[in-house]
Image (tube, rainbow, N blue to C red):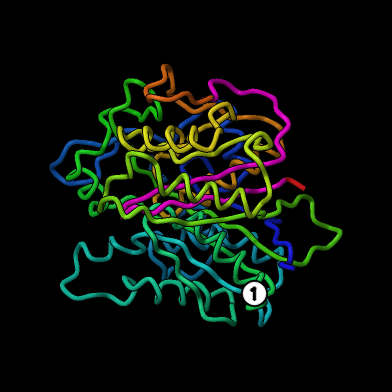
Amino acid sequence: MNREIYITDYNCVTPLGFDVESNWKALLEGKSGVALHQIIDNHEAFFVSKIDSEKLEEEFNKHFNNQNFTRLEKMFLLSLKPLVERHQISDDTAFILSTTKGNISLLKNENTLPEGIYLSKSAQKLADFFGFKTKPIVVSNACVSGVMAISVAKNMIQTGKYKDAFVVAGDEISEFVISGFNSFQAIGIEPCKPYDKNRNGINLGEATASVYITSELNENKEFKFKVLGDSAINDANHISGPSRTGDGLFASIQNAMKEAKVSADRIDFISAHGTATLYNDEMEAIAFNRMDLQNVPLNSMKGYYGHCLGASGLLESIISMESALKNILIPSKNFEELGVSQDLNIIKENQSAEIKYILKTASGFGGCNAAIVLEKC
C-alpha cells in the first residue's frame, strides 16, 4: 500500500508580496500584479506581472549577506528560506527545482555560456547554499513543470527513495521569453481575460513558490493537504497548440481522479490553467465537460499573476490551498462573459465555500498536460 503524501508548508514571492499572507490579502482586495512594463529596449511596453527589482533587493538584503546570486536565484532563496528554517534537512530529503528557462537572462550580454545558464548548476548552487545532501532534481517540462514537480516529489517519496522533499519553482520575465511568445502573436494587448468572450492573449509573469512535502506528520502541523492523485499526459498534438478535443488534459484529470478515488461530484474547486489564449481556454472547457466538471467552481489566477511559466502550477496550487484553508473562493479576474463553446462555472466574486477536494490542472507547449487532486485534511 502506498504511503500517504502531504503538503504541510508553503511560501511564495510574487509582485503582490513576499509571503503568502501578503499575497492572500492582495487577492482578497482584487489587486493584480499585471501592468505595462518596458521589457525590450526600443520596443513597446507589454502587460506583464513583474516584481519590483528595488523591492526585491531590499527584501533580499534583509535576509542574506551573500550577493553572488542572480536575480532569479534571489527570488528562489527568499521563497525557500522560511521553509528550510521550519523543517529539517536530512540525508533522505529531496530538493526539486521547477523552472522552464532558469537564468536565461544571463545570455543577453554573454558571448559564451556562463555556468549559471545550466539548470542543473543553478539547482546545485541553491542546494549547496541550504545544505541539501542529495543531488537536486530539475523538472523542466514547459508550463506543467510546477504541477509535475509536486507529482515527482509524491511518487519518489512513495517509492521510498526520499522521506520528504522541498520543491521550489520559479521563472522571471526576460526579453527572451517575451520575444518568444510575441512571435506566436500570443501576448494580449490588455490585462488578460481567461475564458472571456473578449480575451485576446496571455500576460506573462514572474514569481517563485515553494512547498514542503512529506510522508511523516507531527502534531505541530497547523494544516496539511494530502496529495491524493496525479497524472501527466502528452497529447502530441502540436509544438505549441493544444489538442482541440482536450485529449491530454482529459486523460490527465481522469487518471488523477481515479488514483485519488474522487468522483466529479466531490470536487469542490478547480484551479485551472486559463491562459486567456483562444485555443487553450477552449480546450480546457471541452476537457472539463468531458469529465462532467462543468458545474464545479473554477478560476484562473493569470489575471492576478500573469503566466509565471515554471512557477505557475506551484504558485496556483498554493493559492488554491490557501483558499481551502480560508474557505473563500477567489474570482477569475477580468472575466465578464463566457467565451468558450461549453459551460464552465467561472467564479465571479469572492464567495464563502467549504473546500475539501481541489483539482489543479496545467497545460503547456509540446502537448503536455498535468493534473493533481488535493484533499484538505
Residue at the location (39% across, 60% down)? Answer: 141
Looking at the image, which residue is at 41% across and 49% down? 248
Q: Which residue sits at x=60%, y=37%?
A: 24
- Image position of 141 with respect to 94: above or below: above
**Res 287 quadrant in image:** top left
**Residue 175 located left or right of residue 61:** left
Please provide percent x and percent y for residue 76: 49, 61
Q: Position of residue 50 (x, y in %)?
A: 38, 43
Estimate the x, y position of residue 184 in percent, counting from the top left.
20, 43
Residue assigned mark 1: 159
By secondary structure, the bulk of the magenta-drawn segment is best described as strand
Q: How many marks?
A: 1
Residue lying furthest left? 42
Q: Residue at x 79, y 51 (%)?
A: 222
Residue extent of the magenta highlight = 346-375
Left or right of residue 27, residue 139 in this image: left
Q: Where residue 108 appears, x then y in whole percent?
A: 21, 62
The 10 Å Cα crowd at callout 1, few under 14, some 14 to 19, many 20 or more, is few
Q: Nearer the viewer, residue 202 or 30?
A: 202
Q: Taking 88 as reference, is 223 above or below it?
A: above
> Which quadrant of the figure contains the N terminus?
bottom right
Instruction: Name the residue furthest right.
Output: 219
Q: Amino acid at mark 1?
A: Thr
For label 1, the SS is loop
Vertical arrangement, residue 274 with respect to residue 366, above or below? above
Magenta residue check for 370: yes
Residue 278: quadrant of the picture: top left
Q: Is residue 73 magenta?
A: no
